[in-house]
Every structure is written in structure tokens, then in C-alpha cells.
């Protein structure tokens, strides 16, 4: 074996090792979190009744998954989250694109968008209860409203900030206003629109959890968390919080993958 082939083999092995280490990097934060949690739990600074160890919490989580007791609450939260998100996206994206394509129209609505976007959605829960009662629909509408504002803002911002050089190039080549809008503005706005969609699904989950906690419901992770807290079943409470965090993480990763798949030209 020649020296060059040995160097090539060593380089390939090093590259493979680096790639393997890079894949494990997301676990560092998880290990740090559980390590700090475990140290606090065994230190005695916090009452063990109020803060079980990570092992005890994960054991409760696994038991809840294997026995299926968490499944109805998980499904209920997921269905509400996606219902709110789809409602917000179906209305928010077209309105955001329309607003962004007309500077005067956007400026006329800018105050309302920023006002409601800056208002905590949880503060509006009593208002939505007055209009829609305590039904499942009210929980979905509250979350959809919050997601709608983020999606509208990001969709409009994406159209407004489309690269003028590409718009001018399309006009020089003879494209009419519709072709410029369809083939340039819409495509240019997609990266920012996906940011809005990713933020929208996250805020939908957050508001659904909050609504499940404070608006009457029979099932949902939010209800499970608040019920466990009220009866001091802290292991189940922390396990439900972990499920919520894991769900939010995977929803975010799903939209990152979709963004890479459908907006692969972003930044180019």
C-alpha cells in the first residue's frame, strides 16, 4: 500500500469520525440538561417531592407510553395544534402575500398586525371564551389567531423584501406583472414564509397547551399537566412536560426538513 493511499484512507476515516461526532452534537445539550437536573434533584436544595430525578421522570414517561394512558391526551393536543395551524396557514399566507405585494395596503394594516402580534395571546383567552365558549373550537381559534399573525407578518415581509435585481431582470425579459408576481415574488417570499410557518406551528402548540390548562377540556397534554400539578403527581407532570417539549422539537424539525426540500435555493 502506497503512502498516498494510506493518507487517503486515514483522511476518510477522520472525515467519517467527524461526521459521526457532528451527528451526536444535539445530544450534548440534552445530557447537560439532565445532568444539571440530576445534580439539583439529589443535592437537597429542592424537596424531592417537588423535583424527582430524571430517571424517575423518564420511568413515568415510559410507563405512560407503554400503558397508553398518555396517548389520548397526546392525540388531542396534536389534532388541536394542526387544526389551528392549518386554519392559520390557509388564511394567513394568501393575506400576507397580498399585503406584501402592495406597500400602501401593507402600511394601512401595519399597525393592526404589530398591535395584535405584540399582545400576548394568553391575555386574549377571556375574550375568545366570551365569543366561542369553552368548546374545543375556542382552543383552536385562539391558537390559530396567534399563528395567523406570525404567518401574515412573515409572508408579507418576504414579498416586500424580494430581491429587486431579480424583479428587474424579469421585467427586462418581458414578463408581465402577473408573471413577475407568480414566478419571482412568490418564490422569493417562500424562505420567509416558511419561517412564519415554522413559528406558527410552534406558537400553535404553545397556545393550545395554555388553553387546555385554563379552558375546560377532557383531554390534552395541557390538562394532564395542570391536573398532575394540582394533585402533586409531579413525576407525571414532568413527564407530560417532556412529551410536550419533544413534540415541539419534532414539529420544528419537520418544518426544517420541508423547508430544505421545497426552498432549497434559499440564500443563493
Image (cartoon, helix red, strand yellow):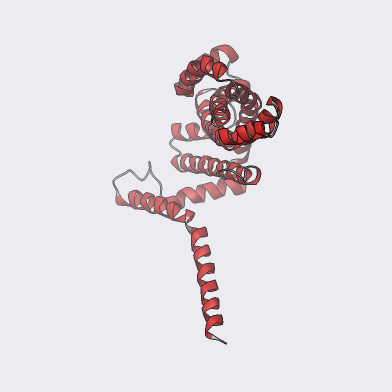
Q: Is residue 163 visible to us here?
A: no
Residue drawn at x 68%, y 25% is 177
Number of marks in the rendered image: 0
- Report whether 157 appears left or right of 34: right
- The x and y percentages for residue 58 are 49, 50
Closer to us: 89 or 40: 89
- The x and y percentages for residue 84 are 61, 28
- Report whether 243 appears left or right of 184: left
- Tell me which corner region of the image, top left, top right, bottom left or bottom right, holds residue 47: top left
Residue drawn at x 63%, y 31% is 185
Residue found farthest to the top: 130
- Tell me which corner region of the image, top left, top right, bottom left or bottom right, holds residue 267: top right
Q: Is residue 140 visible to us here?
A: yes
Residue drawn at x 33%, y 49% is 40
Closer to us: 209 or 59: 209
Vertical relation: 71 (above or below) 139: below
Vertical relation: 9 (above or below) 135: below
- The x and y percentages for residue 135 are 61, 20
Which image quarter is the C terminus in? top right
Vertical relation: 237 (above or below) 142: below
- The x and y percentages for residue 23 are 52, 59
Closer to us: 225 or 168: 168
Amino acid at each position: 500500500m502506497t503512502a498516498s493511499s494510506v493518507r487517503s484512507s486515514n483522511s476518510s476515516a477522520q472525515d467519517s469520525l467527524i461526521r459521526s461526532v457532528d451527528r451526536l452534537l444535539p445530544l450534548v445539550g440534552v445530557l447537560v440538561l439532565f445532568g444539571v437536573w440530576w445534580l439539583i434533584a439529589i443535592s437537597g436544595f429542592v424537596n424531592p417531592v417537588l423535583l424527582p430525578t430524571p430517571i424517575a421522570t423518564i420511568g413515568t414517561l415510559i410507563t405512560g407510553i407503554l400503558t397508553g394512558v398518555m396517548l389520548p391526551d397526546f392525540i388531542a393536543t396534536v389534532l388541536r395544534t394542526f387544526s389551528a395551524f392549518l386554519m392559520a396557514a390557509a388564511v394567513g399566507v394568501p393575506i400576507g402575500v397580498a399585503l406584501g405585494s402592495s406597500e400602501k395596503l401593507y402600511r394601512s394594516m401595519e399597525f393592526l398586525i404589530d398591535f395584535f402580534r405584540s399582545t400576548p395571546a394568553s391575555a386574549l383567552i377571556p375574550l375568545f371564551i366570551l365569543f366561542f365558549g369553552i368548546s374545543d373550537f375556542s382552543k383552536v381559534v385562539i391558537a390559530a389567531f396567534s399563528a395567523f399573525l406570525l404567518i401574515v407578518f412573515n409572508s408579507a415581509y418576504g414579498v416586500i423584501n424580494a430581491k429587486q435585481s431579480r424583479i428587474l431582470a424579469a421585467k427586462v425579459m418581458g414578463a408581465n406583472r402577473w408573471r413577475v408576481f407568480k414566478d419571482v415574488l412568490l418564490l422569493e417570499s417562500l424562505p420567509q414564509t416558511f419561517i412564519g410557518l415554522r413559528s406558527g406551528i410552534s406558537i400553535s402548540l404553545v397556545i393550545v397547551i395554555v388553553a387546555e390548562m385554563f379552558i375546560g377540556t377532557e383531554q390534552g397534554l395541557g390538562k394532564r399537566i395542570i391536573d398532575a400539578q394540582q394533585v402533586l403527581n409531579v413525576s407525571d407532570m414532568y413527564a407530560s412536560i417532556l412529551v410536550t417539549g419533544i413534540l415541539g422539537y419534532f414539529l420544528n424539525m419537520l418544518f426544517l426538513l420541508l423547508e430544505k426540500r421545497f426552498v432549497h435555493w434559499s440564500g443563493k
